[in-house]
Amino acid sequence: MPITKENYIFIYNLNDAESLELARYYASKYNMDTVMDDPSTDTGAVGSGISWEVHGQLVGIDCSGIEILSSEELFNMEVIAPIREALTDSSLTKRTIWGIILGYNVPGGFYVNSSKIVSSTSRVGRGCSVDILANPSTGFPSDPSTGIPENPVYYSYNGRIKNKTYNRSIFKRYSREDTIHSLVTARIDAPTLALAKEFVDNGQKIGKQFLVNGTIFIDPYSDRVGPVPDAYKQDILDFQSDVVPNLNLDTWSTVFMDPYIDIAIPFVQDDSFAWSWFTDRSDFTFFQSSTAARVFFYNADYDASITIRDEEAKTWSMLSLIGGYASTAGAMSICGIEGFLRPIPFFKALLNGSTLGEAYLFSLPYLDSSLTFIGDPLVEVEFPQREISLSETIEEENQISDDESWLIMSKDLARSAAQLYRSEQEALEIRNTIVDLQSGDLQIVLDLLYPSQTLYASFNEEQRHSQLITFVSSLFEYPTILYKYSGLSVTSPTIEDYLTEKEYKVSELLTEVYGGNVISSDNIHNEGWWEFEYTIRDESIQYSDYHFILEVYSDADAVNLVVGPLDSGSAINDGWIYEKERDIFTEISLVGVSSSYIGRKVRYQSQQQSPNNQSLTRGETYYFRIRQYDSATGILYGWRNFSDIIYT
């Protein structure tokens, strides 16, 4: 079930009538519940004079109106503690709370030291999520009706931590399981109540219009140099080349001139999105007239969101909101380039129907950071029609391409051939055993020899090939028909052309059936070569970088070890690859494979070079077991068991 307005609570300042007014104003736009469900439990005291109240989906907390509090302790007392207590209120435990909106004159962050600020949306999102590792017995409730568990344990602040929901390779909407990492949290604040209401209205305009058709402005270049800035620049360039065409929006982009010169966007007009970095100040004239809905503005710098209560501030978040944008994001203090939002997961989420709040969370590398999301998190958008959309591509994630389908069929058919080959070898062994019998009674040997020869004749090479020839012929002829006119570098390709261009290899057991020597040895697997494929599992509650240990046995009881252990985290991990994108594999680095790739595949391909020749016997069944482990902590997870026949 996707996140909806029913899953949100709106936080207001108990000591500020205008804060409550904005909360009610926002609630009215979405027809949210503002009625006290249980008058006996709608208020409470946390201690030290801090209290809270619950009116439906509106939650008041006894806090100051200071935008950035002086310490974590003060932020915990004024913001975190009362929200946590309110979440245990009986009226809220009847709901599934997945999102929090921090309203007008609610603190927007706190100082860790004189220069470092942690944003309220980042801290509240994580700090109000239940830590089920710390309290597994009463942790994340399996039944939504049970609500928040009794005496829940929440995440404490310990510096920024990697976001497990960031940039998932296989996309999925925000779900109940994701609430144990961070709630979707946004901030709607402003210099005045009138402006705060205007910011709410900006989001409502998009909700009514829904379809966005303005220009997307992109600035991939800055004056920062080095590996980390270059990587971020490349992320934006990849977004520009791979994703932007699917938005079907007009595009304006800066161009590269010099690595030490930051070429900035001069102004935006008729715009819906902007993504830039490091020109950290501008002016109100930057946002010129627009007939299009202004959806999301992001400039990656170190203080774009240090304040949204100063109407004269020239920082990007303030300028963009006053300029008519429904939402924005930015850092409140230095966060490091590696902590900036990434555009590909952000727009990938929007294209797949996510709200702005979800898209922000999915594009955020770290939690408990200085980055903050400002605006209405419930806004959804629709992009203009396009011939092939990224959304359609995402929906087809589980569909198999023609080439991958052909490769899978070639392996499965080779397994069938290996089973028949094994049957032939067993029948031959029976016949030869009888021929070699030492018996005084020749008649007994003769009586056994005839049926043993008949058995062998039923499984010999000729019979084996006859059972397979129709299937093998169809398999080898299919790509020659599929790519007869286009798709390969040659027209009317042969099976040899296809294998060479796709860099595929097939089993010798199939080429022998087909005959004619039409496939060269370069496109045939060496006898005894094998490959093991495994789907990466979600073993850890938190973000992890995984490595893998593989062992191969000749028996199902895992007693007779044949190959291994093979560790992807060892200095020599030849043979290990993972699916970075669908059907596209790359080597596993020494860091491992991140949680972002859960659901993707990892493969081990046997090495046949001396002295570590890992060839296995054709036609024999072997037993594989694999386990994941955390590359940072060394925590080992359980073994998973598989078996396969060697088909090469």
Image (cartoon, rainbow, N blue to C red):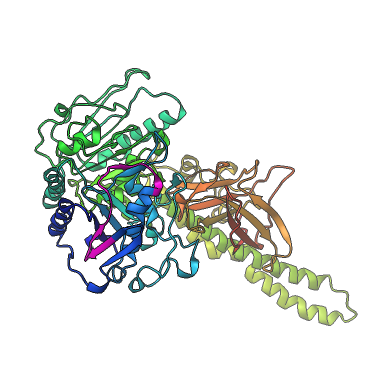
Asked where in the image residue 319 lies, by quadrant, the reply is: top left
Q: Is residue 71 left or right of residue 56?
A: right
Residue 294 in the magenta stretch? The answer is no
Q: Quadrant of the C terminus?
A: bottom right
How far across and down, in percent of the image, does residue 455 sit?
Answer: 67, 74
Measured as percent of width and height from the top left, residue 624 is found at 63, 60
Q: Nearer the viewer, residue 347 or 339?
A: 339
The answer to which quarter of the image holds residue 14 is bottom left
Q: Nearer the viewer, residue 25 or 7?
A: 25
Q: Residue 390 placed where, x, y %?
A: 29, 47
Q: Residue at x 43, y 59 (%)?
A: 154
Can you see residue 197? Answer: yes
Q: Is residue 200 left or right of residue 184?
A: left
> Dividing the image into 4 quarters, which one contains the N terminus?
bottom left
Residue 616 % position (x, y): 68, 55
Left or right for 19, reference 587: left
Q: From this viewpoint, which residue is outermost toward the right?
A: 440
The number of callouts visible is 0
70 drawn magenta: yes
| Residue drawn at point x = 58 percent, y = 42 percent | 590
At x 41%, y 40%, the residue is 112
- Residue 147 or residue 498, whichever sits in front: 147
Q: What stretch of residues is rendered in magenta?
A: 52-73
Residue 7 in view in this figure: no
Rendered residue at 64%/44% (across/down) = 570
